Amino acid sequence: MFRSIRRAAVALTLCSGMFAAAISSVAADPQQPVAADAPRLSSVDNFRDIAGTGAGYDAQGSHRVNKGAIYRSNALTLSDADLATVQGLGIADVIDMRNASEIAQAPDRVPARASYVNIPILAGDISQIPGGITSPEQAAELLRTANRMFVTDVAAREGLAQTLTRIAEQPGPVVIHCTAGKDRTGWAVYLLQSLVGVDAATSMNDYLLTNEYSAASIAATIAHITATRGPQAAAIYRPLLVVDRTYLEAGITQLKADYGTVDKYLRDGLGLRPHVVNALRAKLIK
C-alpha cells in the first residue's frame, strides 16, 4: 500500500506553481566573452539557465558550463512578450516532463521553430492518498520519497534516460521543464551538472534557488490556502510548494547506495550509452 501512496503523491509534490526572484552572479573571466544571462520572464518566472549567470558555473578541469545550451523552467505558459523573448534564444527543443492532466491545465506555448516532446516522469494524483496529507512532515517526506524514486522506479529511470538522450541528440538550445520546474527538473539538472563536475555545493545552491525565484508565488499560494482552508492547512501544504536540501539529498543518498556514482547511475541505472554521455559533456562544457 505504501508504494501506491507514494505514486499517488507525486503530482502535487512535483508541481506547485510559478516562481520569481534573482540568481547570484559568478565572476567573469575578463579575458573571455561572457554569454548573456537567461532573460527574466514575468509569465514563467522559474525560467533560467542551468549554467548559472556571469561566466557560468565552474566545471571539471578549467572548463565552465556552457550558457545558452540548456534552460530549465516551469510550465511554458508564456505571455506574448515572453514568447517573443524566448524565441530570440533560438530554442530547438522543448522537453515537457508532465503528464496529460498537468498539460491540459497549463499547455505550453512552444517557441516558433522549436520541436516539442512530452516525456512524462513520475505523475499521479495526490487526491487518492487515503486520509490525505495530515502534517508538514508527511508532506516533506513525500518530496523526499519522490526524489528517491528517481533512482528506484523503473519507469522514472526510463523517462530520465529518454530526456537526457534527447538533450544529447539535439545540437541546439533545449528547455527542460515540468510544472513548477523544481523536482523532476531539479533532478535532471543535478545529473547534468554533476556529469561535468559542477561541485556539490554549487549544484545544491542552484537547486535551492527555486525558493528565491518562487518566493512571491509561494506567498500568494499560502495566502490563498490560509484564506480558504485555514492556517493549519497552509502549514501542512507549504513543504510541497518549496524545495529543501533534504529533498535532493534523499535522491543523492539513494543514488550513492544503489550505484555509487552519477556516472554509474547514468550507465547502469538509465542505460545511457557512452556516445550519449560524451555528447552531453560536449554540449555542456566549453
Image: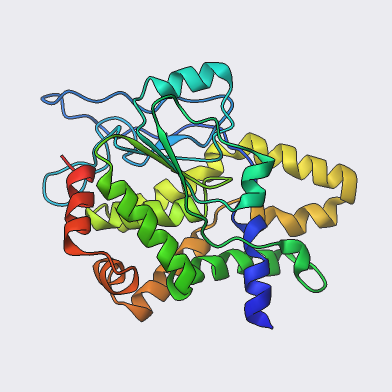
Residue at x 50%, y 22% (from the top left corner): 83
Residue at x 29%, y 30% (from the top left corner): 54
Q: Position of residue 213 (x, y in %)?
A: 54, 37
User: Which is nearer the eye, 12 or 83?
Assistant: 83
Q: Position of residue 253 (x, y in %)?
A: 41, 73
User: Which is nearer the eye, 264 or 106?
Assistant: 106
Total residue callouts: 0
State left or right for residue 132 relative to residue 194.
right
State left or right for residue 146 relative to residue 266.
right
For the C terminus, the quadrant is top left
Q: Please identify the residue farthest to the bottom as the structure is shown.
A: 1
Q: Examine the image and state in which quarter residue 65 appears.
A: top left
On the question of residue 201 being in view, the answer is no
> How is colour applied across the structure in the image?
rainbow
Q: Examine the image and state in which quarter residue 27 appears.
A: top left
User: Compared with residue 129, is residue 106 higher up or lower down, i.e. above or below?
Assistant: above
State left or right for residue 100 relative to residue 31.
right
On the question of residue 254 being in view, the answer is yes
Residue at x 17%, y 63% (from the top left corner): 274
Q: Position of residue 119 (x, y in %)?
A: 47, 53
User: Which is nearer the eye, 53 or 86?
Assistant: 86
Residue at x 37%, y 80% (from the top left corner): 257
For the N terminus, the quadrant is bottom right
Q: Position of residue 219 (x, y in %)?
A: 70, 39
